[in-house]
Amino acid sequence: MILFDFECPSCALVFEELVNKDKLTHECPECKAEATRIISGTRIDPRLGLSTDYPTMADKWERSRRAHHKSEDWD
Ligand SMILES: [Zn+2]
């Protein structure tokens, strides 16, 4: 038995449930619809988003700034 996250397509509830690893669906505790298993690792953590996006954004900005300066020097 493994703790998996499930997402209900009917009411959008996300809940954790201990199920067998090959079980792909589970009854939603709210509306009794068939919720589908989701991989929790794919959920976007805002803290992770900041730590991974920031260097990329800064790098992109730095490169565009350098390119701009370079073209100014050539002119
Ligand atoms: Zn539901």
Image (cartoon, grey):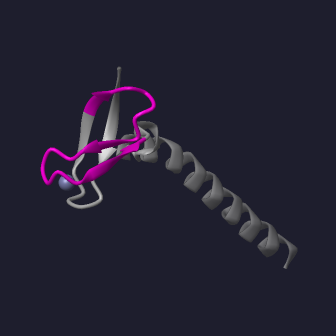
Q: What residue span does the magenta drawing correspond to?
A: 17-38
Question: Residue 38 sits in which quadrant?
Answer: top left
Identify the residue at horizontal 30%, vertical 49% (top origin).
Answer: 35
* Quadrant that contains the C terminus: bottom right
Residue 26, x across and y down, in percent:
29, 41
Identify the residue at horizontal 23%, vertical 40% (top origin).
Answer: 15
Compared to 61, does 19 lie above or below? above
Residue at the limit of the structure toward the top, as seen here: 1
Residue 24, x across and y down, in percent:
41, 40
Is residue 18 or residue 65 the one in the foreground?
A: 18
Q: Is residue 8 left or right of residue 31?
A: right
Identify the residue at horizontal 30%, vertical 59% (top origin).
Answer: 9
Compared to 15, does 30 lie above or below? below
Residue at the limit of the structure toward the right, as seen here: 74
Residue 12, x across and y down, in percent:
24, 57
Indicate whether residue 36 is drawn in magenta.
yes
* Quadrant that contains the N terminus: top left
Question: Residue 3 sits in which quadrant?
Answer: top left
Q: Is residue 5 left or right of residue 55?
A: left
Identify the residue at horizontal 40%, vertical 45% (top origin).
Answer: 43
Q: Is residue 27 left or right of residue 73?
A: left
Question: Ligand 1 quadrant?
Answer: bottom left
